[in-house]
Amino acid sequence: MITIKSPREIDLMREAGRIVAQAHRAVSDIIRPGVSTAAIDRSVEASIRASGASPSFKGYNGFPASACVSINEEVVHGIPSDSILLKSGDIVKVDIGARYKGYHGDSAWTYAVGKISPEAQRLLDVTERALLEGLAHARAGARLSDISHAVQKTAEAEGMHVVRDFVGHGIGRELHEAPQILNYGPAGKGPVLKAGMTLAVEPMVNLGTHEVKMRDNHWTAVTKDGSLSAHFEHTILITQDACELLTARPKEV
Ligand code: MG
Ligand code: MG
């Protein structure tokens, strides 16, 4: 069942989303060559806790950190470490969740470290655009897979491929609620969207094939062919005419 949030719940989710966006701002301030992925994680946790919230991911299914930090061919669920240092040319995905008064916000962003290749920059641009094209279809009366289809179309028009093994999700009192939101498939399928639904839409796009495999740590997924992967995610509220970005970054407000 897809929950419809009350006005009070929506206010709390707006605050959870704002706290996640603020943690991303803290991350963007410290990202540079030589910084460890554990330092990114500490900055995320400090920012979330300073806002009176708690990190949604810490301990979730046993995940050991507050943020997932995944570099280059790592797709999702990278585990922060003091021994993993960013270097110029890397792309780093930082996925952040915060729980505020019982409600979650969830947003991932891919950051460039120093100077990145034109190919990597194009991957970042296309993946962010795939998210925004998907969200352009997120409004009351649309079907869920209208979002999925727009994401896939945008990535594949540029010769890139969406990951199929991981999906977006409803969000609210639980970090992961119904429905699952695929990043591919035909339009016009699935539940009709209603005002008051809250969703986390999160395309992962690879420069190579869509295939991924699991690292030995049983957490981190990497592209099977070693190609670069990007990930962008927003938590949104479905409204009558459009959607509201609950995890909007300053330039998007
Ligand atoms: Mg996320
Ligand atoms: Mg998510």
Image (cartoon, rainbow, N blue to C red):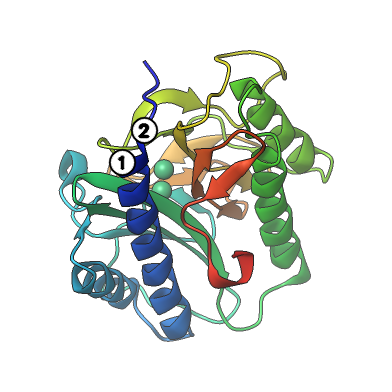
As drawn, the residue found furthest toward the right would be 157
**Which quarter of the figure has residue 145?**
top right
Quadrant location of the C terminus in the rendered image: bottom right
Q: Secondary structure at mark 2?
A: loop
Q: Which quarter of the rendered picture does the N terminus lie within?
A: top left
Label 2 sits on what residue type? Lys
Dot 1 beta carbon under 8 Å from ligand 2:
no
Picture quadrant where residue 157 is located: top right
Q: Are marks 1 and 2 in contact (CB under 8 Å)?
A: yes
Q: Which residue is mark 1?
A: 9
Q: Is residue 166 left or right of residue 160?
A: left
- Disc marking residue 181: none
Q: Give the residue at mark 2.
A: 5
Q: Would you say 47 lies left or right of 151 here?
A: left
The quarter of the image that holds ligand 2 is top left
Left or right of 55? Residue 245 is right
Q: Residue at x 20, y 43 (%)?
A: 60
